[in-house]
Amino acid sequence: MLLVKKLPWTSLLLLLATYGVFGWLITVSDSSGLLWLMGAVYTLLITAALTAPWGLLKRFYASVLQSDSRAFVSVIVGAFLAVVIINWIGVFFRILVLISASALARLDLQTARYRKWEAFGILFIVSLAGLGLGILAKLLDWPIDAESLLRR
């Protein structure tokens, strides 16, 4: 019961709502299971990146940048990613909102003194639940769509 009392409910509900909208948008664009699976994998990657130990990330980047050729390749890949981000700015903003909501929830969990694996589990479960609720909302065609909200 102590676990439930000290959860940061506001940021977790924001995370749930954000991933719900993401799931709804995925289903609007394409209702294939492959896209839903990619959304779940993306959720796992965001959660893992936010809860990974910084020492592990530092060692990874230090090993990548040890030689000049690796540094050159990383600069080329970074430039390519910048061009992709600029061309798909709408998609990038959606991804940025997901990362921001996850980071806020992660910071609140860290402030509440949750360990890394506990934070990972909570973030991943809430994110997947939101993704699933968004997909379910569109598949069941719940009366929550943007057009009817704009008409009011």
Image: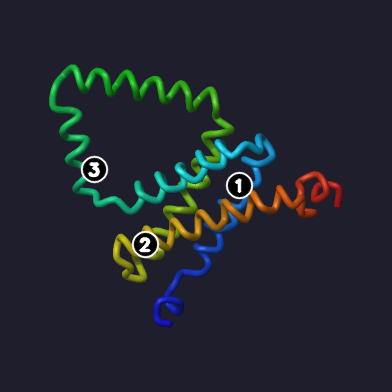
Picture quadrant of residue 6:
bottom left
Within 10 Å of disc 3 (Cα), the crowding (few <14, some 14-19, many 20+) is few
Residue 23 is labelled as 1
Residue occupying the point 56% across, 37% down: 35
Q: Which residue is mark 3?
A: 57
User: Is 18 located above or below residue 12 in the figure?
Assistant: above
- Answer above or below: position of 47 versus 80: below
Please indicate whether residue 13 sits to the left or right of residue 144 in the image. left
Task: Identify the disc placed on residue 119.
Answer: 2
Element under label 3?
helix
124 lies left or right of 13 = left
Q: Position of residue 16 (x, y in %)?
A: 56, 58
Check disc 2 and give the amino acid type.
Answer: Ala
The residue at the far front in this view is 33
Gap in Å between the C-alphas at discs 3 and 2?
A: 18 Å
Mark 2 and mark 1 residues within 8 Å of each other at the beta carbon: no
Residue at 81% in and 47% down: 150
Q: Are marks 3 and 2 in contact (CB under 8 Å)?
A: no
Q: Amino acid at mark 3?
A: Leu
Is 142 displayed left or right of 53 in the figure? right
Q: Mark 2 vs mark 1: which is more N-terminal? A: 1
Mark 1 Cα within 10 Å, few/some/many (few <14, many 20+)? many
Q: Mark 3, mark 1: which one is toward the viewer?
A: 1
